[in-house]
Image: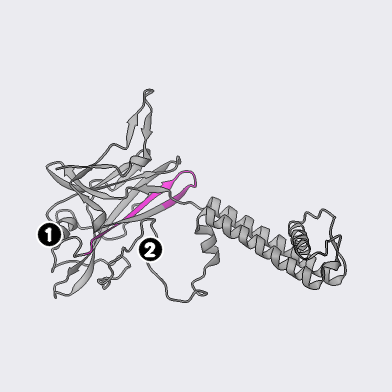
Amino acid sequence: MAKRNYIPRQPKGHAAPKDGDVEFHDLGFSTSTIKNRKRFVNKDGSFNVLRSVGIVRDLHVYHSLVSMKWSSFMGVTLLFYFMINCFFALLYLLNGIEYLGGAEEDGVNAFWTAFFFSVQTLTTVGYGSVSPMGFVANLIAAMGALTGLMVFALATGLLFARFSMPSASILFSENAIIAPYNEGKALMFRLANKRRNMLTNLHIEVIAAWVGRDKSGREKRIYRPLELERDKLTMLPLSWTVVHPLEEDSPITICAKNGCDKVDLELIVILEGYDDTFANIIRAHSSYKYNEIIWNAKFDPAFYFNEYGDTVLELDKLNQFTLID
């Protein structure tokens, strides 16, 4: 897989610019967002951006149904199924329950009889105990049958789209840490694949975003990629500890001198890899705000070898760390 560069990297051996003499790179959030104190990228990888275009214009039904959680999708499907059968049941009642042969004409029972007759019509089951009589009742039943064919075709398509769509299930550590590294220190965070599928040819980028000043002294949002110890990984069978050594020209070092909270430091993580199951490229995003960076700590081991010699990855320990003096 070809390397994907989201932001031009600083050439090797070229000192990073200091505040007041900084090269600006726009990550898409604009360099003028200096008053925003909230994170740009949510922990789940979504953008923390609200769109003021109105509810109707911002409603993207297909995208929402394909991308929402499975529990939400099933809830929406069941609700729509219930509502559409209620709609046809009311049509039968407005036409007159007496035009449904074999139906009970009592108030509540009449509604449920019409409701379940609509269910049978939409699903083309038809048990035969209730049948439409008259032109209008048969017309409503015909509309219900056609609606059922279209609705189930759409539901089948959505299910196929959800199952066939490649998606990353990457677990990031909740915190990044500043830990001892060689003779100095380094920023570290961990990630792992929650699923059993094979991910290969992984490439990661970490971009620091903070409020600094340009040559004219004007405040701007600055975006700089971090130099990583390793930004590529052939496979991801275990956890991956991403390491950024803290040099004098590191954005973390620069921000720490000014106070990471004062410059509103945020680390934006962009991961890309190849999913062998779907034979497609997957991407995952996350971020760490300044208050999610733990100084003077080290990660606890996230895997061990059992008595049979097997490697056991403990995903629940991905964020476990120990504070050090």
Q: State the image coordinates of residue 188 (x, y, percent, origin top left).
A: 24, 47
Q: State the image coordinates of residue 162 (x, y, percent, origin top left).
A: 54, 54
- The quadrant in which residue 264 appears is bottom left
- Drawn side of residue 138 relative to residue 318, left or right: right
Q: Residue 277: within the magenta?
A: yes
Neighbourhood count class around disc 1 (C-alpha, 10 Å): few under 14, some 14–19, many 20 upward: few
Type of amino acid at the residue the image marks with label 1? Lys
Which residue, given by chain and number where applicable, does mark 1 sit on? 257
- Write the residue at 74% across / 56% down: 123
- Write the residue at 82% across / 53% down: 127
Q: What main secondary structure does the magenta stretch of the protein show?
A: strand
> Considering the image in quadrants, where does the C terminus appear?
top left
Q: Which mark is residue 10?
A: none
Q: Secondary structure at mark 1?
A: helix
The region drawn magenta spans 264-282
- Drawn side of residue 13 relative to residue 302, left or right: left
- Write the residue at 55% across / 64% down: 62
Q: Can the viewer see residue 236 in this picture?
A: no
Task: Mark 2 and mark 1 in contact? Answer it, CB < 8 Å.
Answer: no
- The quadrant in which residue 83 appears is bottom right
Name the one closer to the observer, 165 or 314: 314
How many numbered marks have been drawn onto this rendered protein structure?
2
Q: State the image coordinates of residue 227 (x, y, percent, origin top left).
A: 22, 52
Q: Earlier in the sequence, mark 2 or mark 1?
A: 2
Q: Can the viewer see residue 53 in this picture?
A: yes
Q: Residue 299: within the magenta?
A: no
Q: Secondary structure at mark 2?
A: loop
- Write the residue at 26% across / 54% down: 292
Type of amino acid at the residue the image marks with label 2? Phe
In 3D space, how far apart are the residues under numbered discs 2 and 1 (Cα atoms)? 29 Å
In this rendering, the answer to whether 259 lies above or below 183 is below
Which residue, given by chain and number where applicable, does mark 2 sit on? 47
